[in-house]
Image (cartoon, rainbow, N blue to C red):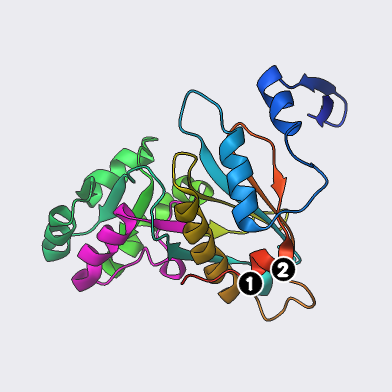
Amino acid sequence: PEVWVLVSQKARIMVKHGKRYRTAIADFDQQGMYEPGEAIAIVKKMAGSKFDETVELHLRTNADPRHADQMVRGVTSLPHGLGKPSRVLVFAQGDAARQAQNAGADYVGDDDLIEKIEGGWVDFDVAIATPDMMGKIGKLGRVLGRRGLMPNPRTGTVSQPQDVGRTVDEAKGGRVEFRMDRTAIIHVSIGKASFEDDQLLNNMAALMDAINQQRPSAVKGSFIKTAFLNSTMGPSVRLDLPSTLAMKIA
């Protein structure tokens, strides 16, 4: 099959999928809808790359990202993690900094880290800060904000000094952040293709439960319009919406 991809208003390129992709999509009904357990089994089967592909969930919402009261953003802990270690940076001083180090944070500091980030360094996955550091790191908004790394109370990454150790533990474990993009879609990872089916199913249930709880009151009608699951290099499998929305962590 040939897929046309719009790359600008004036130019188009034609993308041809490889043999492995074409073979994969022949094994399932692309127009069909699958319950979460079935979809996970299909996605795992189609993840045939040499590396351990990430399994991703994509939800198209009925929210309007132009309105602040309809933005969707939150954080939750996946029971089986994401299958890769998170590099955690902590902006803290004194006892909070020592707590962060003891909890296994990869980078801990204040002015030294701020200066390093201003120079373009962003080699970490999660940034945590104590409230007293927020005034200092505000100027990093343009660097960290567009990468989704800016500490934010809504995502649990602004932590009271006495809670820094617990926050680092969560970040190093199965903590995942989700947010709606400019096209009203939520893209989020639920684990690796090497996970057991039940592990991916439990992670997905925890995530759907958390996202449903973040439904903006301003959204009328259905909150989630469509849901798809895929691996990094694999085709998307459409999820049956009622059974997906009903998922809850046991």
Left or right: residue 233 compared with residue 7: left
Q: Which secondary structure, mark 2?
A: helix
- How far separated are the C-alphas under marks 1 and 2? 6 Å
In the picture of the structure, the residue carrying the numbered disc 1 is: 246
Q: Which secondary structure, mark 1?
A: loop
Q: Amino acid at mark 2?
A: Pro
Q: Determine which quarter of the picture holds residue 239.
A: bottom right
Q: Amino acid at mark 1?
A: Ala
Q: Is there any visible trace of residue 66 in the rendered image? A: no
Q: Is residue 223 above or below residue 2?
A: below
What percent of the width, then of the height, locates residue 146? 53, 48
What percent of the width, then of the height, locates residue 196? 45, 47
* Segment tinted magenta in the rendering: 148-177
Q: Residue at x 38, y 39 (%)?
A: 122
Relative depth, front residue between 23 and 245: 23
Left or right: residue 149 compared with residue 65: left
In the picture of the structure, the residue carrying the numbered disc 2 is: 242
Q: Residue at x 77, y 21 (%)?
A: 15
Q: Residue at x 64, y 34 (%)?
A: 234
